[in-house]
Amino acid sequence: MALSDVDVQFLPEIPADEIKKVFDLIETVRLEIQEDGRKGFPLHRASVFGMSKPRTTQKITESAAAKKYPEVNQAILELGKKYCPIPFNTVNVNKNLISVKHKDSNNVGKSMLLSIGDYTGCNIVIENRVCDAHNKPIVFDGSKLEHWNTSDLNGKKYSLVFYTITDEKKPRDERDSHEREREPRERALKPITDERKLKCREYRQNNKEIERARHERYMSNPENVIKVIERKKANNVPTECAVCKKMVLKYNMPKHLMTHPQE
């Protein structure tokens, strides 16, 4: 598909001081790990500011990140109101995301993409046309035009996507493949083979940060803390886990929980 200036709108570069203000604020945010996102997308950190539509309720409400980081949310929305020429009610912030070919089927109308940070490479490719959104916003219809990133990222990059979401549901034939694959369906369980165990072990080793975050979420429940420690004792496994110690102190549990029967 050939692109024209009507399909993609290139906006002037935003002043460096305004970019730096937003960048410094985003740096204070712990973006969420996206481990169950679109098919083919790599693991990355991202959060939604402004409004969001959770999969569970499918109703538009203020995003969790907007509530948790009101100052950051306000700065991002003010930047959008000043430089975004299209209506928007949500902003997706991605960190170091190298996206695969896709279309933004949940977006209504055009979107504005702005990339900030100290980085090189990782340009946006829109229908085979390479474009640079580094401090220079680009407006295009991501729901109709296929786009992705080049894989030559070097440095730290945040991508801000300003767009509109609604409560309306699209007909099944208008939704793209990644949406349809989220629909409930019966799936045959894969047999647990040595090869699969090895892949799981390699995944855990290569994604220690993700595994630690998952462990901390599980251990945020005091009952789970006791279960884990007692299971370790039963299997004669050391309880010298930083997370276990942290939770025992946090919930003021008896110190003997961390003591082995042999000690």
Image: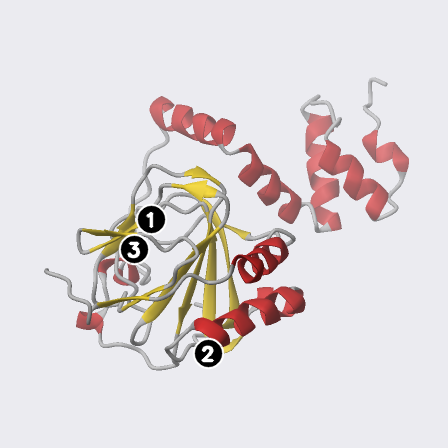
Question: Who comes first in sequence, dot 2 or dot 1?
Answer: 2
* Residue drawn where x is 17% and y is 71% of the image: 173
In the image, residue 41 above or below residue 107:
above
| Disc sitting over residue 99 in the figure | 1
CA–CA distance in space, label 2 to label 3:
26 Å
10 Å crowding of disc 3: few (<14), some (14-19), many (20+): few
Q: Secondary structure at mark 2?
A: loop
Numbered disc 3: secondary structure: loop
> What is the distance, in whole Å, between disc 2 and disc 1 at their CAs?
26 Å
Residue 73 as seen in the image, left or right of residue 201: right
Residue positioned most to the left: 1
| Residue that numbered label 2 is attached to | 59
- At x 46% / y 63%, what residue is drawn? 14
Q: Which is more toward the observer, 257 or 54?
A: 54
Q: Secondary structure at mark 1?
A: loop
Is mark 2 in CB contact (under 8 Å) with mark 3?
no
Q: Nearer the viewer, mark 3 or mark 1?
A: 1
> In front here: 78 or 209?
78
Read off the residue under disc 3: 186
Would you say the residues marked 2 and 1 are in contact, meaning their CB atoms lie under 8 Å apart?
A: no
Q: Residues within 10 Å of mark 1 (few under 14, many from 20)?
A: some
- Where's residue 99, x and y in %? 33, 48
What is the quadrant of the C terminus in the image? top right
Residue 206, compared with residue 94, is above or below; it is above
Sort mark 2 into few (<14), some (14-19) or many (20+) by Cα contacts within 10 Å. Answer: some
**Where 1 falls versus 237 (above or below)?**
below
> Quadrant of residue 260 in the image?
top right
